[in-house]
Image: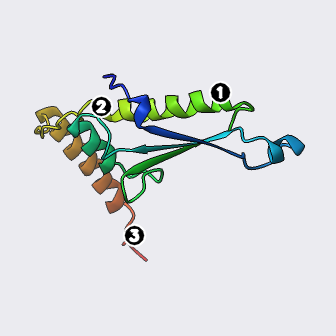
Amino acid sequence: MKHVPVNPDEVEITAIRAQGAGGQNVNKVSSAIHLRFDVRASTLPEDVKQRLLARADTRLTNEGVLVIKAQTARTQELNRADALARLQALVNSVAEPPRVRRATKPTYGSRQRRLEGKAVRSQVKAGRGRVSGTD
């Protein structure tokens, strides 16, 4: 897998309060991380930007800003590291261009097996008709 580094200066990180259960601690400590990364304004290679923007991802806004929220850990440092790692993994997943699929013809053997299966199925279905016989 190809590795395209993300410039940390282009990432906007904000500390927010985490959601969910956590007792008194969750109400007074801003340990969750809200990461914003503007894909269009970044220094990523143009082809990587296009593939990243083309993804059907709910974390990507209409303006081309990628929003990642990390709140699994109890500390801000661990959540920051998690958010940056998830951003890097997402960029790396689109760094390699997808392989071009070339159409191929089915082999002679696969065509024969297909027709053989159709003939067997035809016989099974033909045996399901009304039985005509002597009364």
Between residue 56 and residue 19, name the one nearer to us: 19
The residue beneath circle 2 is 95
Q: Where does residue 14 sit, x and y in percent of width and height?
A: 59, 43
Instruction: Please state if 37 lies on the left or on the right of 4 as rendered.
Output: right
The residue beneath circle 1 is 78
Classify mark 2: residues with Cα within 10 Å, few (<14), some (14-19) or many (20+): many
CA gap between label 2 and label 1 equals 25 Å
Q: Where does residue 68 sit, x and y in percent of width and height?
A: 53, 43
Query: Which residue corresponds to the image point at 85% horizontal and 40% vertical from the top-left?
Result: 25
Instruction: Please state if 50 lies on the left or on the right of 59 as rendered.
Output: left
Label at residue 131: 3
| Amino acid type assigned to the residue bearing label 3 in the image | Val
Instruction: Please state if 72 lies on the left or on the right of 69 as rendered.
Output: right
Q: Where does residue 61 sit, x and y in percent of width and height?
A: 42, 56
Query: Which residue corresponds to the image point at 39% horizontal and 72% vertical from the top-left?
Result: 130
- Split into 4 quadrants, where in the image is the C terminus? bottom left
Q: Where does residue 100 sit, x and y in percent of width and height?
A: 17, 36
CA gap between label 3 and label 2 equals 64 Å
